[in-house]
């Protein structure tokens, strides 16, 4: 299906209205997975013409995504990756874990960004970062699209490596997301050390429910379930 290539429109707007010079595009991958970290990439691209075919990583074939990743790592001005582990996700909740991973990525850049373009409608970063949220920014903004590809390829490779220790779970194919193979392995073997133990899928696993972690939010509210898929997917 044809799609419009991403542009520097948001970056140009931020430069004109805020005086920002270093602007990072930020995107995450792994939010809805049952296993593995949530990974965030921060990419700085400037206003140069991007590689041909750049778009949201989810719209690309595996082959093209890997090809673009190799191009992007040489093309971007700078990029950095940040992760929040399954344990941190269980302890903090997804929103705080995303903030932690994104902060780690941004702080690892060689120059601190003056502004951040964040994919989506919710600003999970907040102060001290100056954030502009853009719905479907991974399709419309060059820096965010670049971040989406780099983050996806990196996390997929990471999950394939972890999966070598637990072949029955098919991490190389599903990257820790729900799949029939993943579901069957969980029912038979229970969660691996890489699984998120506060996730709703454990509610449907009587043999392994004793492993579930219940997180009590610091404010005493109801624990968030955003992005958590149960077993009936």
Image: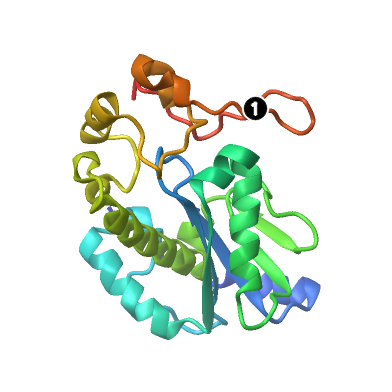
Residue 202 at x, y = what percent? 42, 24
Residue on which the image places disc 1: 223
- At mark 1, the secondary structure is loop
- Whether residue 60 is visible here, answered yes or no, is yes
Instruction: Give me the residue at 45% from left, 39% from top.
Output: 32
Residue 77 higher or lower than 32, as above or below: below
Residue 34 higher or lower than 151, as above or below: above
Residue 111: which quarter of the image? bottom right
Q: Left of 53 or right of it: where is 150?
A: right
Residue 183 at x, y = what percent? 27, 29
Q: Left of 31 or right of it: where is 21?
A: right
* Quadrant housing the C terminus: top left
Instruction: Give me the residue at 64% from left, 41% from top.
Output: 92
- 110 or 220, nearer to the observer: 220
- 184 or 42, nearer to the observer: 184
- Whether residue 2 is visible here, answered yes or no, is no
Instruction: Give me the residue at 51% from left, 51% from top.
Output: 85
């Amino acid at each position: 299906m044809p799609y419009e290539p991403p542009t520097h429109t948001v970056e140009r707007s931020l430069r004109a209205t805020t005086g920002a010079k270093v602007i990072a595009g930020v995107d995450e991958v792994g939010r809805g997975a049952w296993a593995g970290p949530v990974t965030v990439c921060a990419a700085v691209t400037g206003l140069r013409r991007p590689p041909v075919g750049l778009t949201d990583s989810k719209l690309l074939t595996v082959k093209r995504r890997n090809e673009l990743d190799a191009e992007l790592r040489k093309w971007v001005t700078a990029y950095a990756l940040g992760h929040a582990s399954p344990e941190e996700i269980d302890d903090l909740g997804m929103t705080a874990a995303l903030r932690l991973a994104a902060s780690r990525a941004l702080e690892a850049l060689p120059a601190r960004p003056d502004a951040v373009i964040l994919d989506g409608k919710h600003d999970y970063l907040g102060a001290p970062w100056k954030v502009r949220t853009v719905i479907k920014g991974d399709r419309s903004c060059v820096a965010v699209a670049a971040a989406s590809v780099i983050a996806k390829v990196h996390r997929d490779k990471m999950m394939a490596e972890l999966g070598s220790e637990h072949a029955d779970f098919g991490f190389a194919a599903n990257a820790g997301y729900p799949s029939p193979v993943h579901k069957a392995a969980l029912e038979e073997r229970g969660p691996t050390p890489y699984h998120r133990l506060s996730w709703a899928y454990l509610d449907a696993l009587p043999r392994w429910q004793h492993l579930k972690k219940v997180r009590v939010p610091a404010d005493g509210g109801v624990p968030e379930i955003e992005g958590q898929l149960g077993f009936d997917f």
